[in-house]
């Protein structure tokens, strides 16, 4: 495919009517999963469920007046303002409508994520089949956008991960991904002849084998300055921040930025110097760059004091009206519409031989209970001294965001969860 065709395809994939798109049409047949007219052949990797797929097309980050949309606009306005070209126009371009169904190649291989990396496990992500996946991070688009000729861009969108269930985890959330590339004269603005971007050296904790020490240092400095400013822009200049070193397959060195909230350090984003191999693979051997990825819900929950991640999905006007008509820089403190009471029910069972994966339990609970499930927690576990059988007890907390649940309807949902755990996972309810 020519470069132009590749780029045109990316632009065409940015759907223009995203904000008005209706719920996806989803059909499961014996051999395929059909989504909005596209057919995906099922294989042993397929683990998407109707419950997850129904979140496609919601595009909360594009919904005017939604807190995630306000945050998206706020980040965009920071990036536009902070990085003007010589005529005062923004150098960053924004991609916030890219299709969340991507190839596994994009989601993993293009980012040098090894074959045996835990993030590829079906217990951690949603596969349509061996070749297609609901993106697990917005990094999935890095390589294609770099290959299309872009040097500075931000991708925003919904990402999908199988995860635990509590007030800060939901299997669908939103991320922003930033990438900035530099040619030699852009990184070293004095264009000294004596400095070099590249060397044939050794990988150390401070740099990649391809980069000179000064290249790596300069990139890290530029990256950290940009992100510290972004965090101050969002939370105010008195928020405390700290950097920690970490590992990502697609950057080296890699860092996390943490901010202090109510006396606790909260991890806000991951970032680093882009692995040069990714730039080689994208056909850009003569530039270097940095990248970052951050979760929008995490930030929006602190900014607006939203106590539960499920609220973002609410259609309740009591929630939405608090943000309606706001500008991205407006300070809003979410006021709980009313605290509907919780109901808790326990489910205890003997595990089948070979055990089970907790993420399969969460999936079933979420699948049957939908969004009225607030939390699932393992509260007890023991091994029978004689039979050596293992027993677990999970506490499921139910709470509706918009009304009071009665015990009878919770019991009915709970029974259906027990039945499905039995038929799908082979557990024996005690
Ligand atoms: N993709 C990572 C995640 O979802 C976040 C991330 C880390 C993105 C480092 C980046 C990066 O671009 O450089 O956890």
Image (cartoon, rainbow, N blue to C red):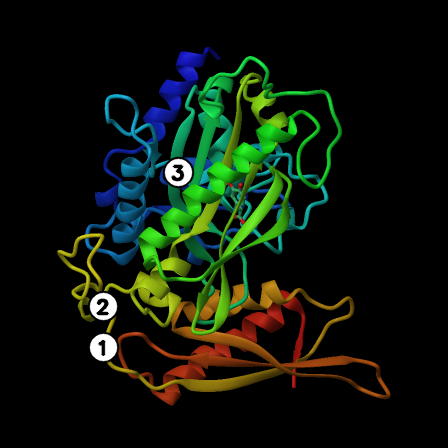
Q: Is mark 2 within 8 Å of ligand 1?
A: no
Between the C-alphas of marks 1 and 2, the distance is 7 Å
Residue furthest to the top in view is 2
Label 1, on which residue?
A: 337
In the picture shown, does residue 71 fall above or below 178? below
Percent across and percent down for residue 210 are 67, 24
Percent across and percent down for residue 221 are 51, 39
Which of the two residues, 321 or 85, is positioned nearer the viewer here? 85
- The mark lying in front, picked from 1 and 3, is 3
Q: Residue at x 61, y 39 (%)?
A: 130
Between the C-alphas of marks 1 and 3, the distance is 33 Å
Which of the two residues, 352 or 56, is positioned nearer the viewer here? 56
Q: Quadrant of residue 178?
A: top left
Q: Are marks 1 and 2 in contact (CB under 8 Å)?
A: yes
- The mark lying in front, picked from 3 and 2, is 3
Percent across and percent down for residue 173 are 42, 55
Camera sees residue 46: no
Label 2, on which residue?
A: 319
* Position of the C terminus by quadrant: bottom right
Label 3, on which residue?
A: 155
Is 34 positioned to the left or the right of 201 in the image?
left
Q: Residue at x 20, y 50 (%)?
A: 64
Q: Helix or strand or loop: what does disc 2 sit on? A: helix
Q: Is mark 1 within 8 Å of ligand 1?
A: no
């Amino acid at each position: 495919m020519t470069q132009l065709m590749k780029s045109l395809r990316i632009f065409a994939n940015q759907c223009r009517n995203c904000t008005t798109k209706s719920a996806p049409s989803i059909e499961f047949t014996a051999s395929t999963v059909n989504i909005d007219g596209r057919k995906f052949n099922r294989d042993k990797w397929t683990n998407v469920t109707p419950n997850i797929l129904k979140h496609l097309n919601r595009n909360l980050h594009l919904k005017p007046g939604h807190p995630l949309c306000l945050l998206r606009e706020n980040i965009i306005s920071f990036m536009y303002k902070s990085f003007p070209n010589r005529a005062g126009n923004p150098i960053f371009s924004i991609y916030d409508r890219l299709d969340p169904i991507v190839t596994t190649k994009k989601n993993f291989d293009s980012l040098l994520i090894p074959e045996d990396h835990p993030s590829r496990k079906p217990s951690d992500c949603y596969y349509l089949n061996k070749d297609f996946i609901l993106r697990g991070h917005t990094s999935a688009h890095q390589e294609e956008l770099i290959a299309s000729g872009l040097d500075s861009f931000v991708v925003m969108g919904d990402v999908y991960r199988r995860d635990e269930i509590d007030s800060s985890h939901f299997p669908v959330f939103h991320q922003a991904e930033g990438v900035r590339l530099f040619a030699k004269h852009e990184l070293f603005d004095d264009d000294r002849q004596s400095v070099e971007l590249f060397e044939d050296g050794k990988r150390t904790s401070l740099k990649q084998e391809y980069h000179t020490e000064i290249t790596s240092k300069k990139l890290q400095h530029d990256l950290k300055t940009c992100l510290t400013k972004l965090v101050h822009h969002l939370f105010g200049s008195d928020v405390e921040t700290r950097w920690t070193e970490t590992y990502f397959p697609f950057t080296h060195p890699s860092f996390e930025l943490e901010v202090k909230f109510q006396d606790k350090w909260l991890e806000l984003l991951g970032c680093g110097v882009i692995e040069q191999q990714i730039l080689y693979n994208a056909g850009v051997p003569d530039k270097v760059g940095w990248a970052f990825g951050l979760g929008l819900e995490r930030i929006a929950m602190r900014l607006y004091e939203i106590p539960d991640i499920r609220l973002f999905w609410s259609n309740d006007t009591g929630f939405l009206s608090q943000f309606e008509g706001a500008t991205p820089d407006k300070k809003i403190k979410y006021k709980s519409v009313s605290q509907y009471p919780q109901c808790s029910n326990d489910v205890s069972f003997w595990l089948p031989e070979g055990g089970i994966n907790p993420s399969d339990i969460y999936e079933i609970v979420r699948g049957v209970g939908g969004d009225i499930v607030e939390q699932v927690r393992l509260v007890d576990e023991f091994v029978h001294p004689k039979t050596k059988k293992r027993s677990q007890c999970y506490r499921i907390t139910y709470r509706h965001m918009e009304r009071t649940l009665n015990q009878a309807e919770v019991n009915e949902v709970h029974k259906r969860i027990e039945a499905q755990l039995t038929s799908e996972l082979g557990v024996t309810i005690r």
